[in-house]
Amino acid sequence: MKKWITIWVFLFLIADNQLFANDTTQPKAHSTITGTASYYSKKFEGRKTATGERFHHKNLTGASNNFKLNTWVKVTNIKTGAFVVVRINDRMHRNMKKKGRVIDLTRSAAAKIGILSKGLAKVRVELAEKPSQTSN
């Protein structure tokens, strides 16, 4: 009897450990998601991102909890069709998911899809290839 209890406890601990072993800093790669985009506050200028680099509004980067770090994504403003390709270099606060946020952009990226005036926009975010140097 003790042998079976020990086995069940061991199996429970292994199963329990697997449930919490998921790394939340590197989520499963999605191919396309829809939700709300926002952009960073000016106070974040110069702060370190999740990749360790410094944040700058002039860069075309974004924060998302839905794509792996250093993934390139195409962000399309659903209302206007305007899009921008950005690199995910940061993570959003966990509470942003409750608000329907899927990506936080730099001011430069937000300007390219026309959301600076409103601050938020419904967007489609999909995996993309790294843009060529000549496309800018």
Image (cartoon, grey):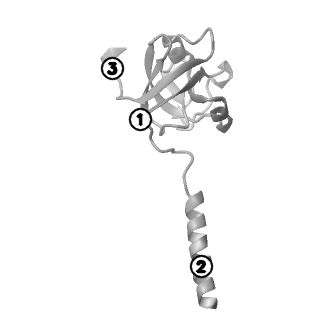
Label 1 element class: loop
Q: Which residue is mark 3?
A: 133
Q: Separation of disc 1 and disc 3 at Cα?
A: 24 Å
Within-10-Å neighbours for mark 1: few <14, some 14–19, many 20+: few
Q: CA distance from mark 3 to mark 2?
A: 57 Å
Q: Earlier in the sequence, mark 3 or mark 2?
A: 2
Tell me: 117 left or right of 76: right
Q: Is residue 63 above or below residue 106?
A: below
Judge depth for marks 1 and 3 and give the one in front.
1
Write down the quadrant of residue 94 in the picture. Answer: top right
User: Tag 1: residue type?
Assistant: Ser
Q: Amino acid at mark 3?
A: Gln
127 w.r.t. 6: above or below: above
Residue drawn at (57%, 16%) of the image: 107
Instruction: Answer whether labels 3 and 2 touch (C-beta < 8 Å).
Output: no
The residue tagged with tag 2: helix, strand or loop?
helix
Q: Earlier in the sequence, mark 1 or mark 2?
A: 2
Q: Gap between marks 1 and 2, in whole Å?
A: 39 Å
Say which residue label 1 marks: 31
- Image quadrant holding the N terminus, namely bottom right
Image quadrant where residue 25 sits: top right
Quadrant location of the C terminus?
A: top left
Residue 86 in the image, given as x and y percentages of width and height: 45, 25
Mark 1 or mark 3: which comes first in sequence? 1
Mark 3, secondary structure of its residue: helix
Residue under circle 2?
A: 8
Kindly identify the amino acid type of the residue bearing the numbered disc 2: Trp
Who is closer to the viewer here, 75 or 90? Answer: 75
